[in-house]
Amino acid sequence: MKKFKLFMNNQWIDAEGQKTFMSYNPCTGEPIAEMAYGSAADTQKAIDAAYDAFQSGCWSGLDADERAAYLLKVADILESRLEEFAKYEAMDTGKPISETRTIDIPLAIRAFRFHADSVKSLTGKVITVPGHQQFNYTSYEPYGVVGSIAPWNFPLHLLTRSIGAALAAGNTVVCKAATLTPVTSQMLAEVFEEAGVPAGVYNIVSGSGGVVGEELLASDKVSMVALTGSEPVGRRLMEASAQAGRIKPLSLELGGKSPIIVEPDCDMNGAINSAILGFCMNQGEVCVSTSRLLLADEIYDEFMDKMVERLGKIRIGNCLKEDTQMGSLISEDHLQTVQGFVDRAVAEGATIRCGGSRLTGGEYDKGSYYPPTVMENVTRDMEIFQEEVFGPVLSVTRYSTLEEAIELANATRFGLGAAIFTENIRKMYWTAEKLDAGTIWMNCSTKSNIETPFGGNRNSGLGREDGVEGLLEYMKVKNHIWFMGPEYDNPYGFENDCK
């Protein structure tokens, strides 16, 4: 079993009072690591380390090429330990190792490489303004210390897409891993240490969000905070940022309730497979999960029959088994939350087509296993249509016209992602224009790339991660105005000695 202290200023230190907590494998209930439990004082020490490092210029003062070289070395070391990281990410989250090996860890590696390359090509611009006596240009600068708060569903991937950009831009970081899944974030500190990244650039504190997160928001030495998490936590960050002595810019990737519209002229097999992936990947614990299926009347029965048949063939089991396709939910508490959504939906008039209760017997009794669950007869006024379940639960609503489907798709307060399935390219383009979401999938679902911007509209968040847009979120724009005329401004007629 691994044991981790807190990592700050390139040193491993005990938490205040030597407090610790355990991280458990959701599939088996077995402990996999002992973690230091950071306090507010510990967090402030990490903030001080990051602040001193930023002020010293040991990172922000480097050429972009030099910072990039460090980040590329981090990526290389992480890649050399891919299998180890994949194993611990699977055990920490309960998701299949086949996913962590091919999705989570590779995306973390790509985040460092992409942003290392992107920052080298970042340029300001010269702006033409009225008159001929000004040279006006812009430049980009890092904010300073960035607090990065990571979620538990993709602990390493969603942390590294944030800090990869923040570090490439020249910021230093203090990271807060989710208490449920802290292991690989601490392991990443070993990678930074081996890569020789200067002290204070990467700091990681494990502990309560109510303690560590609040300290990141309260400290005047933290210039910006990035969160991937729930809508209520995002609201709390916005309130705290406004109330703090220093108003902090925020990058918020929050919840979703993404729709998937399936038209009668779709490729049915492709649409069914994408619909299944959209709410079953990572046990449905995905912010962009396409958890609302809007299905055309003409193909409703055939589509549902085929989808339910395929759902019954998904292999659910221990995360470390190579043939496992779905693992355990993150915890018993979360399973009960998911079950509560299903039970209340039934009480409101929805019907269960498949699934609907936890799996039991054998290895299932050791974890929090929940099968793919399909709810029919869901209407827009039901909780399960409006609220994020964050589990493998699909709500199905039928429609008669595409206009109705688009209206239903936009009928929540979220706007993270939305999908349309049709073989009519004009219809696809028109529908994509009408859907209110940060990402529109056309004949696919739940895809994202480090190279392209990702984020939500409305209550799904502020700002963008990934892509060049994600890099710029971690930089402030400075405008430079150089007066080049024969005389300085002198509207009051004072004597002017300018030559």
Image: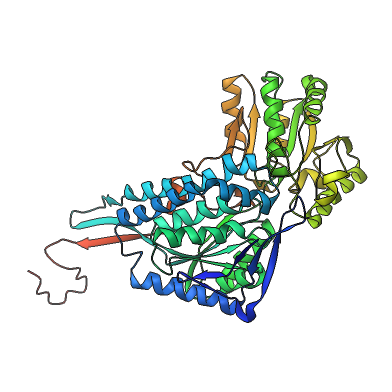
Q: Position of residue 493 (x, y in %)?
A: 17, 74
Viewer can see residue 245: no
Seen at 43% across and 73% down, the residue is 51
Viewer can see residue 189: yes
As drawn, 208 above or below 317: below
Q: Residue furthest bottom?
A: 17
Q: Position of residue 380 (x, y in %)?
A: 79, 41
Seen at 34% across and 53% down, the residue is 69
Q: Nearer the viewer, residue 67 or 349?
A: 67
Q: Quadrant of the C terminus?
A: bottom left
Q: Position of residue 491 (x, y in %)?
A: 21, 70
Seen at 68% across and 42% down, the residue is 96
Number of marks drawn: 0
As drawn, 114 above or below 48: above
Q: Taking 257 as reference, is 111 left or right?
A: left
Q: Taking 218 as reference, is 322 left or right?
A: right
Seen at 9% across and 74% down, the residue is 497
